[in-house]
Amino acid sequence: MLRRALPTISSSEITPESTYLTRMTRRGLLRAGAAALGAGALAACGADAPPPTASSDAQTAGPIRPTPDPRTPTASRQQDELGGALTPYASVTGYNNFYEFSTQKEAVATLARDFNPSPWTVTVGGLVSNPRTYDIDDLRKFDQEERIYRLRCVEAWSMVIPWLGFPLARLLREAGPTSQAKYVRFESLNDPKRFPGQRDRLYQWPYVEGLRLDEAMNDLTLLATGVYGRSLPPQSGAPLRLVVPWKYGFKSIKSIVRIDLVDAPPTSLWMAANGREYGFYANVNPAVPHPRWLQDSERRIGELARRKTLLFNGYEAQVASLYAGMDLARNY
Ligand code: MTE
């Protein structure tokens, strides 16, 4: 993990995709969007489209305009601590799992283009001594830092992403968990008027995820407000998402509106949809295959060869102690 303290970004800095993607890119995304609108919904976290390769990144996601605009995507470093190159901004924001918009990864950015994440509030409550509803700008006042993390999807593709955000632990400390609080439950916005995918009742909306309290308090666990030096675009989970880099990507819930401290493990959207395939822990583990995807290797977006998947996605030193004595195959 790499980190750097950064200045706060205000909501006025959010720039629509159309101002920084090339025309060719937009045409490609529009075509993908139209195709997706005609396609039926798919059944689980795994609407498999072939991931973009280095060359398809260039063709469908397009180059980022060379411009002196200070909002041009930037990161302080070009690789993670293991030497993995950053995944291009166009892929990070053009190949997304966000079922509230679409099950088609390459359609999400287009469908999300007009989603306005402002105004926005996040309520922190449940078993806490200081429940509070925060305006998103209040949350941007927590010191923002850059963290370069690997994101490993259960579908066996991965990216390296420079997030901006702050440790969830800071917010939870402010809320003051009571002694009964053992887990944290996260909820995304539920608004079928703004999320076309929620009109499909295939899933039990809203999207819900959960962590054990000690996982939530771990310093790696980030509440992200930005990516590549700018505010999160809608498809990446604007205005606030979770990033838990040692777990499969579906734990990293987007567009959060509620965070509750609770006394029992929350049932996530994926556990409710298919408890056999999706467990509560979802730690990246090459030794425990998913019923539909082997997990011992992965494809880094933009690369052709597969690479070995690392236990806890390479963050073993920071998190293995959380699971001491647990059977990781049973607690999948
Ligand atoms: N959060 C919400 N609200 N809805 C979603 O569909 N998809 C999850 C996760 N968070 C999802 C979500 C999955 S399956 C993955 S792999 C990651 O977001 C993908 O994040 P990315 O699109 O920024 O790469």
Image: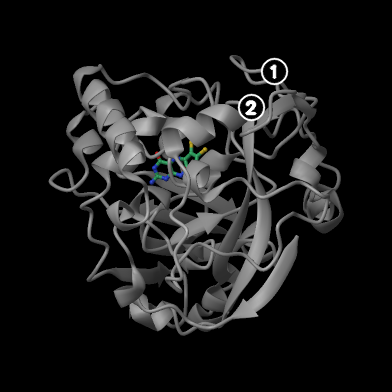
Query: Which label is found at residue 305?
Result: none
Residue 2 percent coordinates (x, y): 74, 64
> Residue shown at 43%/83% (left/top)?
130
Are the residues tagged 1 and 2 within 8 Å (C-beta)? yes
The answer to whether residue 309 is above or below residue 260 is above
| Badge count | 2
> Residue shown at 64%/21% (left/top)?
290
Camera-side mark, 1 or 2: 2
Residue 40 percent coordinates (x, y): 25, 17
Whether residue 319 is visible, yes or no, is: yes
What residue type is disc 1 on?
A: Leu
Quarter that holds the N terminus:
bottom right
Q: Secondary structure at mark 1?
A: loop
Q: Earlier in the sequence, mark 1 or mark 2?
A: 2
Q: Residues within 10 Å of mark 1 (few under 14, many from 20)?
A: some
The answer to whether residue 226 is above or below residue 141 is above
Residue 6 percent coordinates (x, y): 59, 80
**In the foreground, 241 or 173:** 241
The answer to whether residue 312 is above or below residue 262 is above
**In the foreground, 263 or 35:** 35
